[in-house]
Amino acid sequence: MIRILLKILIINAILNAYVVGVPKKFSNIPIDSLPQDLWEKGYWHARVDSIHGDTAFVTLGKPAILKSVKFVCPDSVKDFLKKINPPKTSKIFHINEIICLESEIVNELKNNGYPFASCSTALAKIDETDSAILVDLDIIINPGIQVILKYLDSRIEGRTKKEVLKHLMLFRPGMKYSQKHIDRGTQRLRRAGIIALSMPPYPAINQNGDFALVVRGKDMAANSFQGMLGTNGKDVSGEIQFISKNLFGTGRKVNLLASHRKDQVTFFFFFMEPFIGNLNISPQVNVNIEIANYIRQNYALGFEFPLTFELSGYAGVKMGRNYDKQNPHGGTKLFGGEFSANISTIDDPIFPKHGFIVRAGIMATKLEDIDEGKTRLAVSAKTNQLFVKTYKNFSLWLRANIKGYLSPRFPDKSCWYPLGGWRNLRGFRENQFYGSKVGVISFEPRIFIGNTWAALLFFDFGAYLDFSGWHKPKSYGAGVEYKNPPAAISIIYGISEGRALDEGLVHIGMRLEM
């Protein structure tokens, strides 16, 4: 380690004395940064006397001490400065502290309607003693013109409507310019995956003197067809799906799915209207019907609403009926309500490389057993998370899904479909556990090969509760993914513990974006 010996020169009318030592706060200063580093730390007269090997002999001189600090600014912005902590007087003047202070002041003004604000400082020497230089500091603030954003100026190449951008960015006509608000709104727009921005949004003035927020970019492929096949060597399952995140540029979301898995046929429909008038409330409806030796019908109607830029809430009602084909007049009816919350910071809605998603909800349901003429109340809760972290060409996805009935237990409904059965692998991994209390943790490490290929492993560790207690089965597998817009292909092989290696399930998936 470089050793710096500092000679502190104290000038006295009677004698000159040299004190040689190594003050701790200066012990890590590299020799090649002297004396500039000392000047920045308030020792304006510091000089390097000589350097011998790894030892520097430095004369510090007198430190610059702040005697007073004054803000020079219009009265209109003085209230915003109450949050700013000015440098303390009677302390050594540090240039880095002033640079940070200027940045803090400009950021505060940019978040309160002054995007063109600037800040500078002026120093004045007012006195000098035997041991210090006394200085005054003036912080000069030029806020510029205050900007009120009257409207959003959409310059998007494509069909996406301006109202969709306003909804996603939580833009309100007449709002004060706020850099923090716009940055978070821009991230929310990027996470939607429907617009590729060519530059960050910026304020501009029109001929009438009104300011607008300009958003430039072009439509991304927001519609996709997906087809999947799964087989364990005997049975074949498959599904076809159409997804739109921005139907005809309106921001509407649609999800249509039809699947066939051995003796089960499933139909799923989801529709979401992005907003109602000027309200950021998104009504949505979904229908899920399963037909096998039983028929399961579930319908839900609800509303999604933003709580912050990253956090949204959902409230809705759910109803349905389950019955055996041999007994169409029996079975179970259900009716209930659900509330959930969702927070997301992921950078890509399909292949994220950074960020997380956390969802949690609770549902109360009235269950009516038609055959027995009994009614009971069931309360259930669920949560699922996805955490993604990427370093160079390596990415790790960590998933956690926990759900279960808080009351009653329903242990008779617990079961596990081991991987390698007749179900499609993708949907199967999401639904292989059923029960009164269920938990699944998945690790998915990925290695990216170039810009188009990725190799992945997955490990699923699950647990479910039934009459005999807790069971903890495991599943694992590997695969490859190929993504070259507008197409993406995946091939994955998975298997569960207790099954031979050749008794797993092969999944082939294809997606076409347009």
Image (spheres, rainbow, N blue to C red):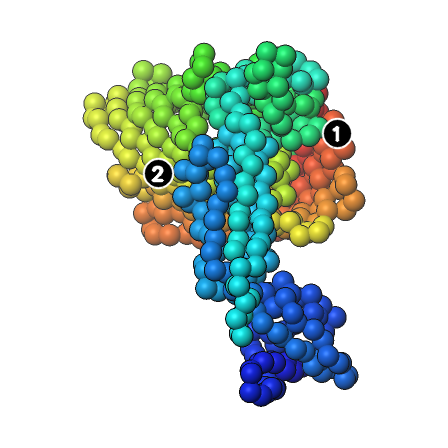
Drawn side of residue 171 relative to residue 221, left or right: left
For the residues carrying marks 1 and 2, which lies nearer the camera in this image?
A: 1
Q: Residues within 10 Å of mark 1 (few under 14, many from 20)?
A: few
Could you give the CA–CA distance between mark 1 and mark 2, rounded to whole angstroms? 38 Å
Picture coordinates of residue 210, whole percent (x, y): 56, 16
Circles 1, 2 touching at the beta carbon (< 8 Å)? no
Drawn side of residue 334 relative to residue 19, left or right: left
* 352 or 285: nearer the viewer: 352
User: Residue at position x 53%, y 21% from top?
Assistant: 149
Q: Is residue 359 above or below residue 272?
A: below
Q: Is residue 423 above or below residue 11?
A: above
What residue sits right under mark 2 in the picture?
381
What residue sits right under mark 1 in the picture?
485
Quadrant including the C terminus: top right
Q: Quadrant of residue 311?
A: top left
First in sequence, mark 1 or 2: give its number: 2
Q: Is residue 63 above or below residue 453?
A: below
Q: Quadrant of residue 338?
A: top left
What element does badge 1 sit on? loop
Picture coordinates of residue 505, whole percent (x, y): 63, 41
Q: Residues within 10 Å of mark 2 (few under 14, many from 20)?
A: some
User: Residue at position x 53%, y 53% from top?
Assistant: 137
Q: Is residue 5 visible?
A: yes
